[in-house]
Amino acid sequence: MSGKSTLLNALIGEKIAIIANKPQTTRTQIKGIVNREKSQIIFLDTPGIHKPKTKLSNIMVQTAFSSAKDVDLILFVIEATSKDIGPGDRLILDKIKESKKKTILIINKIDLIKKEELLKLIQLYSKEYNFEAVIPISATNLDKNIVLDEIEKTLDYGPKYYDDETYTDQTIKMIVEETIREKTLKLLNDEVPHGIYVEVEKIKKSKTMQNESIFNIEATIYCQRESHKGIIIGKNGSKLKQIGTYAREDLEKTLGEKVNLKTWVKVNKDWQDKDSIVKKFKIDN
Ligand SMILES: Nc1nc2c(ncn2[C@@H]2O[C@H](COP(=O)(O)OP(=O)(O)OP(=O)(O)O)[C@@H](O)[C@H]2O)c(=O)[nH]1
Ligand SMILES: [Mg+2]
């Protein structure tokens, strides 16, 4: 919610993580890679920290904390609108203190506050930890070199892990599934989109009549209840159609090709507590 995925996309310069104005949007770890003249920086976006209620949310919180274990630097992203250190941020701060890891504090969404409020927040957090830097930003309107320069200063020499062309670990399949989920988050009320996952069944490239290449994609949106299925489909299929149109438009931009997208809706009751499904969101370490 603090804007971690918005920041990742801005730093990479490509949309690799979905964004929503709802909590628990990111469900797994997403890698983004930036190549600069003298460095390669690998970013790990993670789910936000929250109180887990299902097997899925347990995996999400575990993923967030375990992602922080092997990194050289933590970017701790907080909301500029915070008046105090809330329980979630307090928990993260405690983990950072425990790990003694190099950390940059990113205060995001400064477009929403006044300068005095920002100064108070900087003071409040500076008392808590010896941050490598404190950087106030608006991830939605970012001069990325300010952030990248500060990160570069903290880095040690190490191997180059990725070639220059690679900027993410996200496959086309993952990007399609996440884009469809992003549109449900945008178009539906809280409970319904939080209870869905998307499964791509088919991606096949072919040629249109005009000899342009096109991705033919088929995907299923799984929801938790029969009543949710009706809401996702909408009157005469209107909602599902809208989700499909928005997703297609976005995917055509991201993939740089024409897309033909077909979506279905199915119920998979209480999937958030089924190991066979939630393992999809687990990371290896
Ligand atoms: N006003 C303002 N809104 C922002 C800014 N950065 C992000 N947002 C909004 O904040 C909301 C959450 O952004 P995300 O990037 O999805 O947040 P997140 O931290 O990845 O959230 P989770 O994945 O749920 O943990 C979205 O509605 C963004 O558009 C900013 O600089 N200013
Ligand atoms: Mg996110």
Image (cartoon, grey):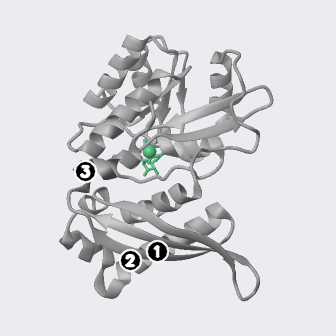
Are the residues flagged by discs 2 and 3 in contact, CB closer than 8 Å?
A: no
Which residue position is annotated with label 2? 240
The amino acid type of the residue labelled 3 equals Lys
Inter-mark Cα distance, 1 to 2: 6 Å
The percent coordinates of residue 16 (x first, y second) are 57, 50
Which label belongs to residue 244?
Answer: 1
Which label belongs to residue 274?
Answer: 3
Q: Quadrant of ligand 2?
A: top left
Q: Identify the element where label 1 is drawn.
A: helix
- Rendered-image quadrant of the C terminus: top left
The amino acid type of the residue labelled 2 equals Leu
- Rendered-image quadrant of the N terminus: top left
Q: Residue at x 29, y 45 (%)?
A: 56
The percent coordinates of residue 180 (x first, y second) are 45, 64
The amino acid type of the residue labelled 1 equals Gly
Decide: is 45 above or below 246: above
Q: Identify the element where label 2 is drawn.
A: helix
Q: Residue at x 75, y 87 (%)?
A: 210
Judging depth in this view, the residue of 109 and 161 nearest the camera is 161
* Mark 2 residue crowding within 10 angstroms, few (<14) / some (14–19) / many (20+): many
Inter-mark Cα distance, 2 to 3: 25 Å
